[in-house]
Image (cartoon, helix red, strand yellow):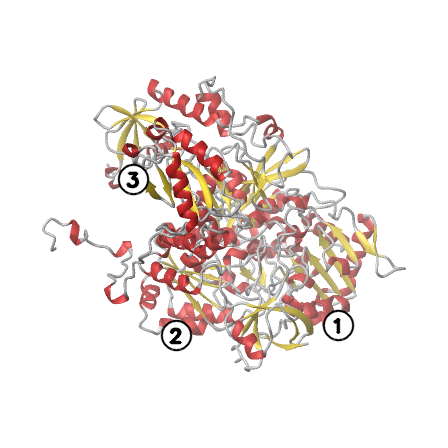
Amino acid sequence: MSEQDVNEISVTVNGTQIEAQPGEMLIAAADRAGVHIPRFCYHERMSPVGMCRMCLVDVDTGRGPMLQPSCMVPVSEGMIVDTESDDTKRAQEGILEFLLVNHPLDCPVCDKGGECPLQDQTLAYGPGESRFIEEKRHYEKPIPISDLVHLDRERCILCDRCTRFADEIAGDPLIQFTERGNSTQVLTFPDEPFSSYFSGNTVQICPVGALTAAPYRFKARPWDLEENESTCTTCSMGCRIAVQSSRNELVRYLGVDVESVNHGWLCDKGRFNFEAVNSDERLTSPLVRDPDNQRQLLGTDWGSALASSAEAIRRAGPQRIGIIGGSRLTNEDAYAWSKFARSVVGTDNIDAQLGDGLPAELVLGLPPATIADACEADTVLIVGPDLKEELAILHLRLRGAATKGRTQIVEIGATATGSEPYAQRSIRCESGEAAKALSELLNSDDPLAKQLRDGSVVVVLGRSSVAESADPAVATASLIQSELPHATFLAALRRGNVRGALDMGLTPGFLPGRTRISNPSAMLAQKWQQIPEEQGLDTSEMLQAAAAGQIETLILLGADPLSDFPDRNLAAEAIQKVKTVIAIDNFVTSSVAQADIVLPATAYGEQSGTTTNIEGRISRVTQKITPPGSTRDDWMIATELAWRLGGDLELTSKEDIWREIEQVAPSHAGVTLERVLSNETLEGILVQETSIDLNLPVPRDTPIADGYGLRLISGRKLWDAATTTTHSPSLRHLAESPSLKVHSNDLERLGIPTGTEVRVISTRTTENLTVVADDNVQRGTAVLPFNQPGGSANRFIDATAVINDIRIETL
Amino acid sequence: MTFFTDDNLALAEEIIGRYPKPRSAMIPLLHLAQEQEGWVTDEAMTQIGELVGTTSAEVLGTCSFYEMFKRHPVGKYVINICTTMSCALMGAGELMEHAESRLGVRAGSTTSDGLFTLEGAECQAACTEAPCLQVNYRHQYRVTTDQFDELLDELASSDHAVPDHGVLSQIRQHIPKDRSVGAVPPEEVKAAPVWLSEDGDS
Ligand code: SF4
Ligand code: SF4
Ligand code: FES
């Protein structure tokens, strides 16, 4: 017997002996042994509550068999369980008869019909008839409890799953059992909707059709759905999902429960933005600028669009070309573009990040941590963006680790965040001064310093504000490297497959496989015609060069610098100066509208391949529907362009590309196509090897605020003007209109009443905005969200500055 | 949200201070709110949520569990006539009928002058004194229809000792800081309380 076995408990279930863990609930032990006990309220990711009694089974602990709810009874040695006894059957029949007393049985018009646990279990375990002939309980049929979720109280069986989820998992207890007693019902507070970022999960876990999602209501019946397992690429968390379609249209995503990533949960943005894929506003054929009317884009055919693109690339030559974007792409597409840029065009001016991320050096070179490492660490130190807004499910996982486990969360930053309610300590410092605050902490006799020095630490590192450069993050990283050498890092980058794009070399100075351009693998050197010797420009440098007239052709690879680059003025100037802008995208974004040639790409759900999440975990994305119009995969566009430039990428399919990646990228060696296509990608294949020696850049110091100005802080919100959000009819109204938030003392000092319009002056522009007093904002700072519809902070930001200050004046 | 008067807000803070977790003060604060307004308004629930650090929805969930927290305006005097078995046998039905015609409202409603709310209630644990009723939860025993009329006149005349609906007691418990035992968070409780131990001194 091994040591572990000593602690196991043996239980007899239906005559067979099974092994269980101490403290485990009987229902979970039975599940693992393949014995299914029916249930409604029990959910393996939430604490048991014993609400529904559907899981009653005969349990004998030496005092004779007794009916006990198996979701509430921990296993004990020698327990004898019968899940099929006559008493159990009678109990199941009784419970179902009770549950159906008030259930409306409107299955024919219920979204859940066909995949409903109540239907299924009634069929399998129900009595077949009811003795109840009285009038059922009636409520107003579905009431919206948020913009996205509808509640039908007649169908509710009061299992407490939704309310438990809201409270225990999401931390947004906005729905509650009210009127407890004969008319217990789930409700929100009047006028306070269930506006949780995670509300869609309640729809997925509701065991009946009481909760339905607005984007899916009456869209399809479960038996019409086709389903593929895939990965959400809305942010870089990489949540595993099931993509469902009906008649070649995406209709629903469901969260898939994997231990290493999302535990089955999704954020509402990731869950519902499939609407954008189905949008009529999608680009479906190539466009070119009308020679007669510069303000107009005209439809054209692929042949001429590609020919003129190739011509523009050839004309510019490798030094005067820039490629921005690529985080939307799958790894395979990213590889094709990386190879196209280096091997065919001969340029290293390529960057998947839009000046709002971290230097690739940090992402690829800092000692890596996994999400699971973070959730098991003694301390998670968050120095970066508000995770609830930018990496919603990472926030959920960390919240779970802090509230249910023993992990302590410590965050350092300039603004209040969604992590605060569950953090052990929220250290507020001036914007750009996190390293200073951390250093002070570590050199004090605060017990937290000891906790950080002696225990395991995972650092979630990112840019806490788009108005500050990456320098403060670099400073924090170097401080942690020297003071807490045992700490490992998770880079809080948000954009879809940004990690995969960096791994594939869509960043200046790096090649596929996390190697430097100076150090290509032998295989790569052999397969690629050429590799630039000089490190190229990153996005910010490319835009500066373009504004200075040094870039002739700019390729936007699913990127919208006018909205996403921190500095709109620079982006606008660059796009205007460049001779030819080639945009490869799904929609006409602000930047695409300025392009000279527009090539329509396939979107999520229309392409297959792999994606890599923030921790370097590779998982599959699968094609579910056929792409609209003549849209093409990004890798195909790269191959076509290469061919027109007289080169050959020698790539003919996604499988081909993966085989080549496995050969040329040292970090991915051994991750064969067979493995990628196998079930291993359910949890994902973790790739953490890196072959670079970390060479941290020297950060610039944060200048001291001058006392007249306010330090500008600009973070992102989950609901913003992101392309997929604005093209999803159910989501586009969820973003708040932006206002400048300033501490009331500062407003008083300036003699400005809250709610007034003021003149906001930065080095970039002077514009009018409404200012609102908010005492969650630190004194001396001003908070303006990034990329909100109707006004973004990017107009005020100078991307070359370490930090941005603004002044406000009365009109 | 500002619902509580300044005095009551100060009191609310004191009440919260008596508990290791602010949320534990939710029910006492609901009483305080009902005392101030005669019923529990939405604004009150929102402010209580803010004071104890939870959502308004959670306050509503708790509040709505209790029949005696009213979430709509009620009269100055809430009259509950017991309609359960013993009282029913002893004439509660007749008493209710009389009350309804005398007040001109059905059970469950409030008179237009805002003085009386009439309700049918479950057993009030005074079966030996049937039929019985309560005025703002103060018992009246073996009530005849004539006595009921007298009671109404008395209540209307203000020559009586029944405080307005919502008032819990006229003597307020006040524990000054120096006499407070101090709130100990549950996770810091290491041993059984003194009064639980056998010899009472360990
Ligand atoms: S709405 Fe659904 S999940 Fe919520 S309690 Fe009712 S049955 Fe359960
Ligand atoms: S957290 Fe990110 S990956 Fe997960 S569902 Fe949301 S957007 Fe998708
Ligand atoms: S599953 Fe056990 S009581 Fe509901």
Compared across the picture, whether B35 is left or right of A653 comes to left
Q: From the viewer's perspective, is residue B148 above or below residue A447?
A: above
- Tell me which chain the residue with mark 3 is part of: A
Where's the C terminus of chain A, which quadrant? bottom right
- Point 57% across, 26% down: residue: A107
Q: Which mark is residue A440?
A: 2
SS under mark 3: loop
Q: Is residue A198 visible?
A: yes
Nearer-the-camera pick, A308 or A589: A589
Label 3 crowd bin: few (<14), some (14–19), many (20+), radius 10 Å: few
Where's the N terminus of chain A, which quadrant? top left
- Marks 1 and 3, how far apart at CA: 68 Å
Residue B110 position, x and y percent, is 49, 43
Residue A359 position, x and y percent, is 55, 65
- Tell me which chain the residue with mark 2 is part of: A
Residue, disc 3 = A23
Residue, disc 1 = A549
Q: Is residue B67 visible?
A: no
Which kind of residue does numbered mark 1 sit on?
Answer: Gly
